[in-house]
Amino acid sequence: MADTLPFPDDLIEFQQCLHQSRAEYSALCRALPWSVEPLAGWPGTVHPHTGEVTGGRDVSPGYTPEQEAEESRLLGLVRVLSIAVSRHPYWTTLEKDAGLVRARMELEQDPKVRPDAAGVTGGVKAA
């Protein structure tokens, strides 16, 4: 992949925003309680020989309305951007073979679309 394909600017922007939105969504999900609704936790199982406790959950306070709204917004944005990238007219200009798959992989790995290289904050709004 020494020579990169000449991807259209809007496709690069969609992919940049998609990478950024996925990263934001993943970070949010890691920070959220394990249950959307408040739920009681349960104890784990103690291993009889080592005493290590596995399984179990702490009490979940559930999502706040703000957390629920942000999770829904980011998931919607990821969906919209995924569709924008996958249905972009550029893909119809390529042969339907392994070259198309390589081109899609190349777009995802292009240094211009990586969130850390691009510094994109996401300019596309979810419906």
Image (spheres, grey):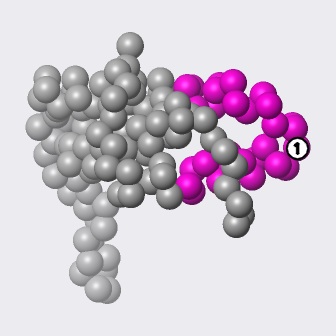
Q: Secondary structure beneath disc 1?
A: loop
Nearer to me, 5 or 19: 5
Estimate the x, y position of residue 46 in percent, counting from the top left. Answer: 26, 71
The C terminus: image quadrant = top left
Q: Is residue 53 above or below residue 88?
A: below
Nearer to me, 127 or 5: 5
The N terminus: image quadrant = bottom right
Does residue 82 appear in the picture of this structure? no
Residue that sits furthest to the bottom in the current view: 49
Residue drawn at the location 35% of the way across and 21% of the way down: 125
Q: Is residue 67 above or below residue 5?
A: above
Q: Residues within 10 Å of mark 1 (few under 14, many from 20)?
A: few
Nearer to me, 52 or 32: 32
Q: Which residue is mark 1?
A: 97
Does residue 109 appear in the picture of this structure? yes
Q: Which residues are magenta?
A: 83-110
Estimate the x, y position of residue 85 in percent, counting from the top left. Answer: 58, 32
Residue type (three-letter) at the residue carrying disc 1: Asp
- The total of numbered circles placed on residues is 1
Residue drawn at the location 85% of the way across and 49% of the way down: 98
Residue drawn at the location 61% of the way across and 48% of the way down: 107
Residue that sits furthest to the top in the current view: 127
Residue drawn at the location 25% of the way across and 71% of the way down: 53
Asked whether residue 107 is drawn in magenta, I would say yes
Estimate the x, y position of residue 108 in percent, counting from the top left. Answer: 57, 50
Q: Quadrant of residue 38?
A: top left
